[in-house]
Amino acid sequence: MELLEQISQRLQAGKAKEVKSLVQQAIDAGVPAQDILEQGLLSGMSVIGEKFKRNEVFVPEVLVAARAMNRGAELLKPLLMQEGVKATGRACIGTVQGDLHDIGKNLVKMMLEAKGLEVIDLGTDVSAETFVKTAAEQNCQIICCSALLTTTMSVMGDVVRAAEAAGIRNQVKIMVGGAPVSQAFCDEIGADAYTPDAASAADFAASVCGA
Ligand code: B1M
């Protein structure tokens, strides 16, 4: 079986140690880090996501797959960073209040760092006030909000309003993303950018910080 397919399969089985070892084998074989990420790790995670939706797997299986995903992604981080272009700037990132999904947020963080940005990771379940307070106190050029639940994405609108109320809206860009988020939603809440994946999120953040 091809290495990337094996990574995807073992991730679906939640075998973190095997995933880590296969990712290392793929790196040693010269497979580009981006391909290992997309065709191995993310491909496996997307199969798990579909099965979760159909109630074919449940929270424990999803959690072990997520752990395997993180173990593999850790190995890729330095490689993605080597391939990145140096830029200067500071961002804060978090998953919005009420939402504990952090795999996508962690990937976005990794890609931002790969572009040379300093990233303050606020974790999950982050309130609008915390995003804005951090951006103001730490002089962030961009606030990055991730949401995976339709019930939590409205917090992104709260972030925009909190930034306006704090008087920092013209100093900071607000980028939103995550599976239920769209360009239409971004426009509706008055955020600056919607990006569909970690790579385009990093491109946008780097362009803001380089400007
Ligand atoms: Co949950 N969950 N989950 N879950 N989970 C979803 C999101 C769901 C779609 C599954 C389903 O189909 N039913 C569904 C949401 C339905 C909805 O709102 N419409 C769902 C649900 C319902 C729930 C619970 C309510 C389940 C329950 O308890 N009954 C519960 C909620 C807990 C909470 O947050 N309060 C829950 C719990 C969990 C786990 C804890 C088991 C686990 C999270 C583990 C973790 O994150 N540490 C989990 C997982 C893993 C998923 C699925 C299967 C996978 C999500 C994921 O990590 N994908 C997900 C199903 C799915 O998405 N198909 C599902 C891989 C990740 C790389 O993709 O995060 O989309 P994603 O990130 C992408 C892009 O979206 C983008 O970049 C990334 C890739 O390049 N991106 C950004 C993300 N953030 C960005 C920010 C940006 C830009 C781009 O700029 C700032």
Image (spheres, rainbow, N blue to C red):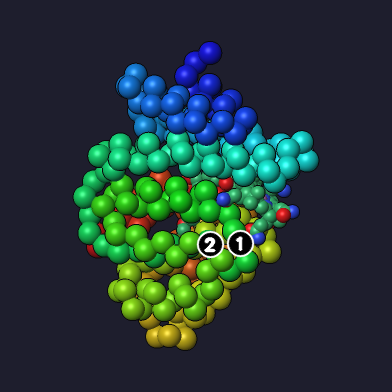
Which percent across, then down, holds residue 84?
A: 27, 43
Dot 1, crowdedness within 10 Å: few (<14), some or many (≥20)? Answer: many
The residue lying at 30 percent from left, 74 percent from top is 139
User: Does the numbered disc 2 mark a residue whose Cβ is under 8 Å from ligand 1?
Assistant: yes
Look at the picture and state if 82 lies above or below 211.
above
Which percent across, then down, holds residue 31?
A: 36, 23
Which is more toward the observer, 197 or 94?
Answer: 94
Q: Which residue is mark 1?
A: 99
Look at the picture and state if 62 lies above or below 190.
above
Which is more toward the observer, 30 or 123?
Answer: 123
The answer to which image quadrant residue 167 occupies is bottom left
In the image, 101: left or right of 117?
right
Q: Circle 1 sits in a helix, a strand or a loop, which is it? A: loop
Query: Looking at the rendering, in which quadrant would you find the C terminus?
Result: bottom left
Which percent across, then down, holds residue 159?
A: 51, 74
In the image, 157: left or right of 91?
right
| Label whose residue precedes the other's in the sequence (1 or 2) | 1
In the image, 83: left or right of 120?
left
Which is more toward the observer, 143 or 13?
Answer: 13
Q: Circle 2 sits in a helix, a strand or a loop, which is it? A: loop
Q: Which residue is mark 2?
A: 124
The answer to which image quadrant residue 152 occupies is bottom right
Question: Identity of the amino acid at label 1?
Answer: Asp
The residue lying at 43 percent from left, 39 percent from top is 73
Question: Identity of the amino acid at label 2?
Answer: Thr
Which percent across, then down, holds residue 118?
A: 29, 59
The residue lying at 21 percent from left, 50 percent from top is 86
Outermost residue, top side: 1
The residue lying at 40 percent from left, 53 percent from top is 109
CB contact under 8 Å: marks 1 and 2: yes
